[in-house]
Image (spheres, rainbow, N blue to C red):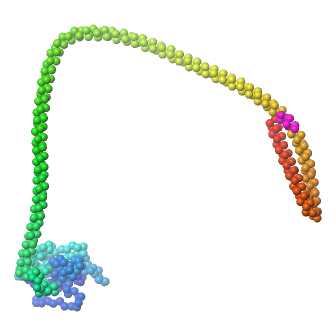
């Protein structure tokens, strides 16, 4: 079994699809630091089923996908295919060449394939078991594995020796069998729990069955008792029926005599019913006449009440007219007296008005004289200031008296007009 080719696409620094062929002899990969030499070994380890991100120098498995650069976008998946020859039938498959493939997606999903046929990770691990291939096998040796080989601790060297000796597959099978046994024990425990629960339900159902059986037995006993009681009551009813029939036979003879008396009583009742019909007819006629008389009496009483009401209203109206007539006479007397008084007051007011008009004329003349004197004094500006103030006060006094006289005259005129209007 030899390694023939490695195809890498989107894994770490291999953004483009890259195929590396391994020829006969030794193949060496050389280059400066950071060119991606270690990524080839990581790709081989990764395609063989490595599950630890730290083994391929990463923090999580998504970091195995090309992350992109300044000038190139990242890709969405990484795939690696490993082609090995199987001419010596080291791999338990009927093919001369075997291609192992693995693809991981950025959303976390991953696929495995053998000869481009989808399979499980367990199928890949079982295929590579005891062949030297594998993520932790001695076919791929790195620095930490050299330290493990040279270590003084036996448990660190045991894994490599077991893989080389071919017992790793059996140990894995043993572990798988132990895990299946543990799951079987857990299933047995769950089964015991289920059995216990079912047994408790069976006991409960057994108790319910006993109760149901007792119920049916008691129900049958109750039915038998009820049937016996009903049978006894039927016997009693038959005895009572026979007794009643005997009494009825004796009463039937008496019934014939009672029937004759009943027929005579029915004939008498019919005669009385006819008489009752006649009496009822007479009573209805008398009642109709009484109703007519009653209606006539009610009409007379209503007319009498209306006449009384009219008489009372007429009396009240006559009394009111008499009172109104007295009041009108008194008002006429008062109006006559008021007219005499107003006439005498009119004469007095007319005389007073004439006096006021005469006084008004005198005061108007005095006011005109005072105005003329004032105008003369105003024209004569050489008078003293004290005389001017006296004249001014006198003028104001005279003007006030004139205005007062005019107001009194106007008031007297209004009074006169009012008196004339009242007269």
Q: Can residue 101 be seen in this view?
A: no
Give residue 42's position: percent from left, percent from top: 18, 82
Q: Which residue is drawn at 82% across and 33% down?
A: 339
Q: In which quarter of the image is residue 243?
A: top left
Quarter of the C terminus within the rendering: top right
Task: Tell me: residue 362, above or below residue 375.
Answer: above
Q: Can residue 126 be seen in this view?
A: yes
Task: Tell me: residue 163, above or below residue 200.
Answer: below
Quarter of the N terminus within the rendering: bottom left
Out of 146 and 43, give the one closest to the viewer. 146
The number of numbered badges drawn on the structure is 0
Q: Residue at x 10, y 90 (%)?
A: 25
Q: Which residue is drawn at 15% across and 15% down?
A: 246
Q: Give the range drawn in magenta.
A: 341-348
Q: Residue furthest front?
A: 386
Give residue 9's position: percent from left, percent from top: 21, 81
Give residue 161's position: percent from left, percent from top: 7, 82
């Amino acid at each position: 079994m030899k390694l023939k080719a490695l195809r890498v696409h989107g894994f770490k620094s291999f953004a483009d699809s890259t195929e590396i062929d391994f020829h006969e002899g030794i193949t060496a990969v050389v280059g400066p630091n950071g060119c991606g030499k270690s990524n080839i070994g990581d790709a081989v380890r990764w395609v063989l089923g490595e599950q630890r991100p730290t083994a391929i120098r990463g923090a999580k498995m998504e970091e195995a996908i090309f992350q992109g650069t300044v000038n190139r976008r990242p890709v969405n998946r990484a795939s690696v295919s490993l082609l090995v020859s199987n001419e010596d039938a080291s791999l338990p498959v009927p093919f001369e060449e075997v291609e192992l493939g693995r693809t991981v997606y950025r959303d976390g999903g991953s696929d495995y394939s053998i000869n481009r046929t989808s399979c499980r990770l367990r199928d890949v691990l079982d295929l590579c078991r005891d062949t030297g291939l594998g993520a932790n096998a001695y076919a791929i040796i790195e620095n930490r594995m050299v330290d493990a080989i040279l270590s003084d601790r036996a448990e660190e060297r045991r894994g490599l020796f077991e893989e080389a000796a071919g017992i790793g597959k059996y140990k894995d099978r043993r572990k798988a069998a132990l895990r299946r046994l543990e799951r079987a024990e857990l299933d047995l425990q769950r089964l015991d729990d289920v059995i216990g629960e079912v047994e408790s339900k069976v006991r409960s159902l057994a108790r319910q069955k006993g109760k149901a059986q007792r119920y049916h037995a008691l129900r049958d006993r109750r039915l038998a008792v009820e049937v016996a009681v009903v049978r006894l009551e039927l016997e009693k009813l038959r005895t009572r029926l026979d007794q009643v029939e005997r009494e009825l036979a004796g009463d039937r003879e008496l019934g014939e005599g009672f029937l004759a008396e009943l027929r005579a009583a029915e004939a008498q009742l019919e005669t009385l019913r006819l008489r009752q019909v006649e009496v009822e007819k007479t009573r209805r006629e008398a009642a109709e006449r009484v109703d007519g008389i009653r209606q006539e009496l009610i009409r007379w009483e209503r007319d009498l009440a209306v006449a009384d009401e009219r008489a009372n209203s007429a009396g009240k109206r006559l009394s009111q007219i008499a009172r109104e007539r007295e009041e009108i006479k008194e008002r006429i007397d008062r109006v006559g007296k008021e007219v005499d008084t107003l006439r005498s007051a009119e004469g007095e007011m007319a005389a007073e008005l004439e006096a006021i008009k005469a006084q008004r004329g005198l005061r108007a003349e005095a006011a005109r004289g005072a105005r003329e004197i004032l105008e003369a004094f105003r024209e004569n500006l050489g008078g003293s200031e004290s005389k001017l103030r006296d004249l001014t006060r006198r003028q104001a006094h005279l003007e006030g008296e004139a205005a007062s006289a005019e107001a009194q005259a106007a008031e007297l005129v209004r009074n006169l007009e009012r008196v004339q209007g009242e007269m």
